[in-house]
Image (cartoon, rainbow, N blue to C red):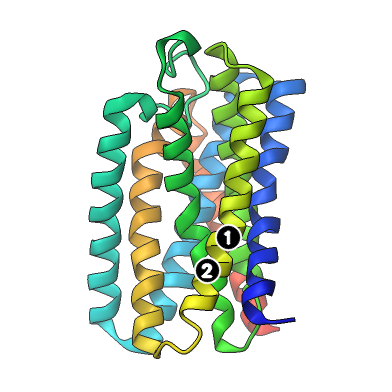
Amino acid sequence: MAIWMQAGLWGLAGASSLLIGVALAWFAPFPKRVTTGFMAFGCGVLISAVSYDLILDGFGKAGIWPVVLGAVAGSVLYTVANALISRNGGHYRKRSGKQQGHAAQGGGLAIAAGAFLDGIPESVVLGVGMLDGGGVSIAMFAAIVLSNFPEGLSSAVGMKAAGRGAGYVFGLWAAIVLCSGAAALIGAAALGDAPPYLLAAVNALAAGALLTMIADTMIPEAVEGERGETGLLVTLGFLVAFALSHLGAAA
């Protein structure tokens, strides 16, 4: 099977935990403290994956400048796009409380666009990461799965509280899963012959976008239900992802 097709399937698999989180939120809702705890853990997982599997790995392959320039560009692009989405009602797309507003107030398209914006960088990383001939990064894949679950969970809780129907919620996240698979496929197909410095820059661009997303949309939800354990959960998530990366490298 061609690498780009494998990348697309891995992208679909990694994003599928979004739907698992959505289904649990819809049919077996957790207390808010549990929801925000999952989000805190997911923050730690993504921070670790960005630090070691994207930034540090890119630095080792291409040096400092592709990493720095790519990360800054990714952060700026995400910030601009997120600002446009936020002005139209998508700012609270990952919040599990009443912040999303009632469905009748609009913002549905902005929430969909925001969910798309959040999910694409990590899927591109998964596809691009397969181009070095070593197959999918188990550590990065696990990080995506472990972070997508609380994202879907928290966002779906908020959408349900805002009065959005099951068709809208499940349809939106199913579309995001499909787009994530397509992003991984396209990333692998488009960059198949790219030099190491360009791959490092693309990964760094995604890393910058992901770090900015964590700060803008995930951390606010994680700390809202804080009762003293948020920092601990972030640390545990970080260490779990680090251990997965270390064990994968040792294998």
Q: Is residue 128 visible?
A: no
Residue 170 at x, y = what percent? 67, 31
Question: If the image is split into quadrants, where does the C terminus sit?
Answer: bottom right
On the rendered image, what quadrant is the N terminus found in?
A: bottom right
Picture layout, residue 133 above or below residue 111:
below
Q: Is residue 25 left or right of residue 132?
A: right
Residue 86 is situated, as x and y percent measured from the top left of the image, at 31, 31
Residue under the image location 50 percent in, 50 percent down: 119
Q: Is residue 65 left or right of residue 15?
A: left
- Please report contact status of discs 2 and 1: CB closer than 8 Å, yes or no: yes
The answer to whether residue 185 is visible is yes
Which of the pair 179/35 is nearer the observer? 179
Residue at left 24%, top 72%? 68
Q: Quadrant of residue 219?
A: top left
Q: Secondary structure at mark 2?
A: helix
Check the image and report above or below for 146 versus 11.
above
Q: Which mark is residue 115?
A: none
Residue 104: percent from left, percent from top:
46, 9
Residue 156 picture quarter: top right
Q: Is residue 101 above or below residue 170?
A: above
Residue type (three-letter) at the residue carrying disc 1: Ala
Circle 1 residue: 182
Q: Amino acid at mark 2?
A: Ile
- Asked whether 67 or 43 is in front, the reply is 67
Residue occupying the point 30% across, 75% down: 67
Q: Quadrant of residue 131?
A: bottom right
Q: Residue at x 73, y 29 (%)?
A: 24
Q: Who is closer to the viewer here, 191 or 197?
A: 191
Residue 207 on image: x %, y %: 39, 62
Residue receiving disc 2: 186
> What's the CA distance linking mark 2 and mark 1?
6 Å
